[in-house]
Amino acid sequence: MNFSSIRGRIHFESGFLYDGENMKKKYLGAMLTTLLLVLTGAACAAESVQKDYDAAAQAIAHDFTQRETAAFDRALDANTIIANALNDLVADAGWKEGLRRELNTVIKTKLGSKLISQMPEGAYAKVLRTRADGKKALALIRLDYGDAGTGYMDLHLVRGKDGAVRIVDWYDYSTGQLYTQSLRQLIGVMSPTPTIMGKLFDVVSNRKENINAVMELINLYRTQQYAQVVEQFLVLDENMRKNRMLSIVAVQAGSLSNNNELYHKALANLERHFHADPSMAFMLIDYYYLEQQYDKAMLALDRVQKSFGVEDAAILSLKANTHLSDSQYGKAVAQARRAIAIEPEYESSYWSLLNALILAKNYAPAVKVAKDLEQNFDYDMSPESMGGSEVFLPFIASVEYKAWRSAR
């Protein structure tokens, strides 16, 4: 047999047999067609999955805006969340099972309501981005808490065996950690074995006196004695004040205490020990404002924006206000205008822009912003209403403002 002639007629590649050059052309054409169909099918499948994640996130945000939690409650995979929080926790099996049942009920029936409880009338939730990555997606949702600030939760979404989108965790920017991590620490506090709590809170040396100190702080927090939480925390030894979770608890307590001095001190401790930690950037913004360290505030805002992976009107408004506080009015105007451009319905951006324009003595465009606030957000921009704020007095006295009001 002439093997060379056989090789000239018949080739074996990738499981296909074809004959000569004519067959080669046909095979290549078929192969390319098949490949294109496969890639197109994969793209369509990926697009379909992305749409499912988008729809689930939008439904949750819509419900939150309506002060409803049905979509969130329905999507919560309480079993997975609890299992991850309890993972490797050495404790009595009966206690763990009872705790599992209790947490399951609370998570399914009360967690959503707790998340939206601080949203004032007129505030809304917004999906900033949904990004699919392999077998899961991250959906960043912003919650407007009015005077209490802004909250961000990055939902971890997966598709269950039934095709439904489920929430298996989320990153909470207000604590700089996953919800399951916070839940795990809560479980440690509830544990009948004090050493478990010490381990979960990473208490230095797990000594009895340190564990007792943590228990005292947590009990004060539970009973809403927030000022005492901060006071007790600040007298702990340095090693304890370096504890990440305890530092966060102290900051949260300081914020709830309505005592600006204690809040400032708790933030100062957080900045001293965790200023290089990107996950603390969101919490430290307030500290840099209080310290009038506006360059550091901008860096913190940039870090947060980068971690989002998308522009956010609320962050841009904060950047505008930071420039405003630093008397950089042109930069403040630019940031506020950008915020309005990407989210026209976000009210705070208009106030940032109005203040920047007035302080820059740029009254003609300030009139336009005042009109927007009156027409689109139902504010009274009359001299009687605005006259109570000193910053508005030059604007009210301006030719441009008077011409607008007289033409009404």
Image (cartoon, grey):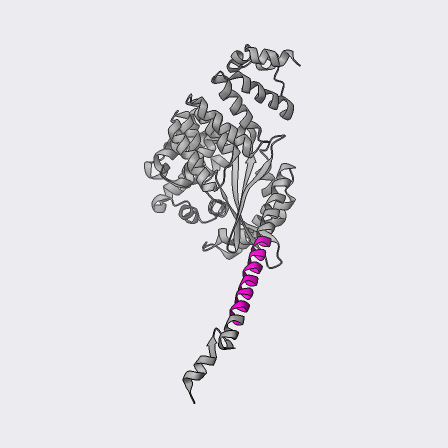
Please provide the residue range marked out in magenta. Answer: 27-49
Quadrant where the N terminus lies?
bottom left
Q: Is residue 180 left or right of residue 274?
A: right
Q: Is residue 87 left or right of residue 71?
A: left
Find out whether residue 361 is within the magenta segment. no
Please tell me which residue lies in front, 390 or 167.
390
Tell me, yes or no, if residue 73 can be seen here: yes
Residue 162 location, quadrant = bottom right
In the image, residue 39 above or below residue 321: below
Please tell me which residue lies in front, 195 or 73.
73
Q: Is residue 105 left or right of residue 175?
A: right
Tell me, yes or no, if residue 387 can be seen here: no
In the image, residue 242 above or below residue 388: below
Q: Position of residue 393 (x, y in %)?
A: 53, 12
Quadrant where the C terminus lies?
top right
Residue 397 location, quadrant = top right
Question: Which SS type dominates the magenta stretch?
Answer: helix
Find out whether residue 42 is within the magenta segment. yes
